[in-house]
Image (cartoon, grey):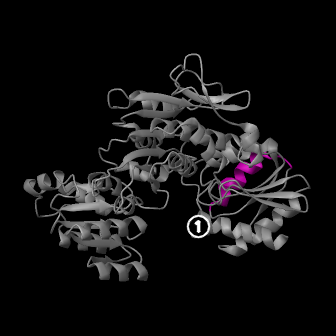
Amino acid sequence: MTSQIPFSDVTRERVAQLTSWHHDWSELRVAVLGLGVTGFSVADTLVELGARVRVIYGAPDSDRERLLDVIGAERFVASDNEAQLADLRAFDPELVIVSPGYRPDHPLTSWAIERGAPVWGDIELGWRLRDKTARVADWICITGTNGKTTTTQLTAHMLQAAGLRVTPAGNIGTPILDALRDPQGYDVLVVELSSFQLERMGEISPYASACLNFADDHLDWHGSAEAYWAAKARVYEHTQVACVYNRADAETERMVENADVIDGARAISFGLDAPPISGFGVVDGILLDRGYHAERREEAFELVTLEELAGRHIAQPHMVQNMLAASALARARGAEPAEIASAILSFTPDQHRAERLGEVAGVTYIDDSKATNAHAADASLRAHEGVVWIVGGLLKGVDIDALVATHAHRLRGAVVIGAERDEVLAALARHLGQKPVVEITEPSGDPVMTAAVQAAAKLAEPGDIVLLSPAAASMDQFTDYAARGNSFQAAVRALG
């Protein structure tokens, strides 16, 4: 369906030239699709710039609706797309800003694209508005199927240890536009990017960038593995100084090879093996930087040891990879090896990411609720033996069979939760033989996890690990992965 009103070339040119906070955004009609954290930050920013903003969304949110009224934004809520589309057509926007969750083929974005209206995401808008303060931050951009949040936090922690004013932003929780409007400004923004954000990233130019790893995920959203790969690969486009990639993941190296970067940008690798020239790696239990040493053909900087990491329970292989990637990014922006070492040894991982909860009756309980895809669960399972695995949720179109086959030997048994249990149960039946599998049928919330933990405790023996690493999204039974993890932790406390 297309609009009867042709989109003006003059308007399109005006919008294209809006590349600064200090340009004239006044009275520009902007439709913002979605009223989540990102959508509200977009609306709040554009109202501050003087634009006429109308937020169109599908579910009531009394708190944010009240705030929209206070700041002077218009709003329209309807549960069906037809009503939203009618409102969008009537508003006749000159620019559409899309929240990350909207698929590329959503009817509202399709209408705007067919009409010829500019359609941006919050990252493209943020890049255009990055000069609000005199202190214009460099952007370090990070994506990957697994490990994005931890690496983003580590990189910011390292740069803070180096004396820079820095904050993590983007998909990590603080919207990019909220960070950009800080009155003091920042030296560096470490920007976590989801594949949804990369889909509509626009032409930004990161100071340094990284895709940590690549495995199929969100295929239901992107439509194909090829489209998901292309979205992830955009993180490297126009990188200025350093493209950081995973030596053990050929797809990330291929992304760098295909990227159109700024002349002089270097490819820096990381991995758990001995580092080549321009690489970060591990030799004799020592994490090494061979990427930025002036004599890197013969020498390397020592960072920290695996023994030191083990003393803080952060020596799991996937954590070490995250540290090496973050070190490469932080070194690109000038952090010194001693500053990086100090930051690593003072770092505390996020809740619900391989979080050890302690022992009950000789069984260790680990909360890895943030493992929302098979790739993340694979990394978590590899770190343990004798596992009772709590698994399941929304699989997002990804086949879990290979994951189960790979780790069947380390499983004591499994407890299956989630709405899409049939696929998980079938994979476990194919690969676990006579090992016990318990299906939890409670529909949602705390009863699910209480039953799952009690079942896992009965399957586990002293010395075993009960691991919540669902390999699936949580929204079928919980608000988000944090709510799922909190419910798991409460159930473990009840055991004790």
Tell me which segment is drawn in magenta: 420-434
Is 123 or 308 nearer to us in this picture? 308
- Judged left or right of residue 7, residue 53 is right
Question: Helix, strand or loop at disc 1?
Answer: loop
The image position of residue 242, as x and y in percent, is 43, 33
| 419 lies above or below 257 | below
Give the quarter of the figure containing the N terminus.
bottom left
Is 116 or 233 nearer to us in this picture? 233
Residue found 81% across the figure and 73% down from its top: 494
Please identify the residue farthest to the top as the structure is shown: 298
Q: Is residue 423 magenta?
A: yes
Give the quarter of the figure containing the C terminus.
bottom right
The image position of residue 278, as x and y in percent, is 52, 24
- Judged left or right of residue 360, residue 35 is left
Residue found 52% across the figure and 49% down from its top: 152
Give the mark count. 1
In which image quadrant can residue 174 be found?
Answer: bottom left
Residue found 65% across the figure and 24% down from its top: 274
| 206 lies above or below 292 | below
- Judged left or right of residue 78, residue 253 is right
Residue under label 1: 476
Q: Residues within 10 Å of mark 1 (few under 14, many from 20)?
A: some
The image position of residue 17, as x and y in percent, is 16, 51
The image position of residue 299, as x and y in percent, is 60, 20
The amino acid on which the numbered mark 1 sits, given as a three-letter code, is Asp
Residue found 12% across the figure and 58% down from its top: 7
